[in-house]
Amino acid sequence: MEAAAQEQQNKSRVVKVDSVESWETFVSQANNQGCPVRNVVVHFTAIWCMPSVAMNPLFEELASAYPDVLFLSVDVDDVKDVASKLEVKAMPTFLLMREGAVVDKLVGANPEEIRKRIDSFVQSIRVYVA
């Protein structure tokens, strides 16, 4: 893992994806059978999108609350190919992924719904793993 990404991770549980390569690395690590974090929540954002920026504190809070899930932040202007491949057309968009596959998608800044979906996702993980 790059030093900058490692340093950011020490301060924050949300990892910023800044390239297609880093996206592929994180997703492939989550697919790895030996990896304890096989579930990912992704926040597709843009610095010019105020509703998306407003969701950052909640996303940080959720990342701290669920340490067994990898939380990624993707700026669509920095990593257009990933956003395009996953058909992200509006910000904010939140994807919930298990073993590399999208299992849920939520578009828009709806804190209660995001919290509810992520909580449900994490509960299903715990049942899935048990």
Image (spheres, grey):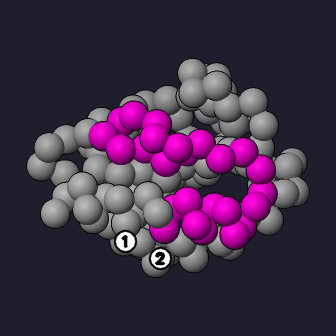
* Front-lying residue, 86 or 21: 86
* Front-lying residue, 66 or 106: 106
Which residue shows up at 26% across the image and 62% down it? 127
- Amino acid type, mark 1: Pro
Q: Which residue is mark 1?
A: 67
- What element does badge 1 sit on? loop
Residue 33 lies, in percent from the top left, at 14, 43
Which residue shows up at 27% across the image and 65% down it? 126
Tell me, yes or no, whether the highlighted magenta stretch contains residue 22.
no
Position above or below: 122 against 2: below
Please say whether residue 74 is visible from this viewpoint.
no
Residue lying farthest left?
34
How many numbered circles are shown?
Answer: 2
Q: Are marks 1 and 2 in contact (CB under 8 Å)?
A: yes
- Amino acid type, mark 2: Ser
Segment tinted magenta in the rendering: 95-119
Position above or below: 119 against 71: below
